[in-house]
Amino acid sequence: MIPEQLYEAQRLRTLFLFSEGNFREVPRRVFLSFKYLRELDLSGCGLQGRRALIDMALPQTPNELQTLPLFVVGGIPDLLLLERLDLHGSLKITQLENVRDTPYIGYYGLMKMKGIESLGLYWGDNGRCCPSIDPEDGSPFTIFQERKQNQSPIRSDRFPPDAFEANYILSCLQPHQNLKRLLVKGYPGFSFPNWRSLINLTSVALIDCKRCEGLPTLGNLTLLNSLLLQGMHEVRRIGGEFYGQSTRRPFSALKELTLIEFPNLEEWLGSHSRDVFPSLSKLIIKKCQKLKVMPQIISTIQHLELHDCAACLVDYFQNLTSLTILVIDNIENLSSFPGAFPGNNPFLTSLEIKSCPWLYSLPTFEDLTALKSLTIRWCEKLSYLPKGLQNLNALESLEIGDCHSLMFLPEVGTRGSSNLRTLSIENCSNLTSLSMGMKNLTSLEHLIIMYCPSLVTLPQGIRHLSALQSLTILGCCTEFISLPEELQNLTGLHSLEIRSCPGLEALPEWIDMLISLRSLAISECHRIRLLPEGIEYLTGLQHLSIQDCPQLLERCRQGTGEDWPKIAHVPYKHIGLPTLRHPTEASSSSS
């Protein structure tokens, strides 16, 4: 409910309404009272009932409303309300599927709004802030629709009614040429209107326009720098119409291009102009499984991502040498990389290769001297890592996971100083050795070794990890009876987690040498019988977790357990069985 005192602020210029529930009605006197209202934001609350939107319209008295971020459509008459506004800034029009029976000709209200810079048009948007609106019986707008119903144009049976009407409605919603950002989502039409006048667009997003059989002409937009195309299920070919036949330098300013979910796209052809995408620096192609033909991308691209695509697409990028970020994800038939790619990109700083189950080899990485982050996951056939890892002295993060054919890891950072700070080895079932040159990893801060059952011991030289802050050992090192004595030299260690080490019988007495330890977690180590005396001297220990260690539970029982005096000083303790968590809670806590 709107407070009564608010109506006394007759010169109010800005009104934002937020509510945990729904405003079922916006009183008409809101606008009768606020004649000078310039900004109205209702996106933080719901609106139910057709009358709410009608009352939201400007009355006949003068009004200066300029911003209305969210406008929910209940039918054609509601679009008439926009004609009485001169809005500025951003405008989001949702639930355009409610606009039916399109005999209303001549609506060009958006074209008059010179101040709108950002426009979103949504069909089928049923988000929390975009409630459905039901028409009310007896309203003059219902009568208007009934009166015009028989004048609808003849439709072809080939076009479903909502697609035919959506084509028409979108053409009527053409904005003013000052528009800079345009988003169209859920549009059910078969084609896009020709909006050549929108020459000032800098950003365009077309999302879930699943019936469209072709893309609009966008290459002539000389200021366009960001383009997102997603969910185009019927597009089978991208050709000259995308670039514009008369455009000399198509997409001359485009920097970011994203294509997502084109399940039937087979050909992406180039332009008649050789100088296409001359400014492109970021390209993302995702879920385009049938795409086999595409234009050669210019060599200035810096950020490339290929997700869930055919392996042959990688060949189109083998001559790139300016990449700084590369992601190769879920390329099922990729067995090897073409030529020297990606090792021929000396400026590459981040490389991710994931979910390539048939990838068995990688080219040399010895020239990737700028590489800071390397991730290789879910490559089950990969039996060895590339040559040249010892040259990657800029590398700060190395993550290897789910590579079940991998048996050993080569040395890293043996030539010169190493900057590696994070090393994560996870779920490599046949990994038997970590010959990582540990003595050279003097900057390593985080070491994670998880679910490598064939790895029976920790790597040699772990005592040289003077900067190590956290160590996680989970589901490996099965021959451990006690922790190796080398660990007592890790005086800077803050966090130690040991889980699923079935052979571990005790924690060492020298554990008090880990003077910086703040967190200690032990779980699923069923043979540990007692805690060492030295644990009570870890005065900085703040968190202690002991889970699923049956022999320790009784000894650590509060007040009566024999080991309770050793841990009583720890402020935060969790001792018992593992806590069952909701999947979303578990994932968020692990991040």
Image (cartoon, helix red, strand yellow):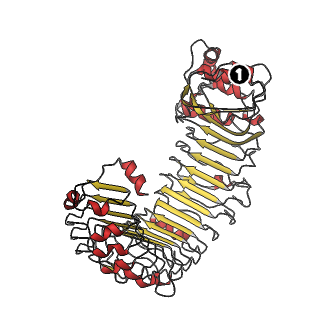
Front position in the image: 232 or 559: 559
- Residue at figure coordinates x 22%, y 74% from the top left: 481
Residue 61: name its quadrant: top right
Instruction: Confirm whether residue 193 shows in the render.
Output: no
Left or right: residue 21 versus residue 121 is left
Horizontal side of 159 relative to 192 (left or right) equals left
Amino acid type shown at disc 1:
Tyr
Q: Nearer the viewer, residue 267 or 99?
A: 99
Q: Quadrant of the C terminus?
A: bottom left
Q: Going 39% across and 49% down the picture, which residue do you hit?
A: 585
Quadrant showing the N terminus: top right
Residue tagged by mark 1? 7
Q: Is 350 situated above or below 213?
A: below
289 vs 117: above or below: below
On the image, the x and y values in percent for residue 307 come to 48, 60
Residue 20 spot, x, y in % from top left: 53, 31
Q: Residue at x 53, y 47 (%)?
A: 232
View extreme (top): residue: 138
Q: Is residue 31 visible?
A: yes
Element assignment for label 1:
helix
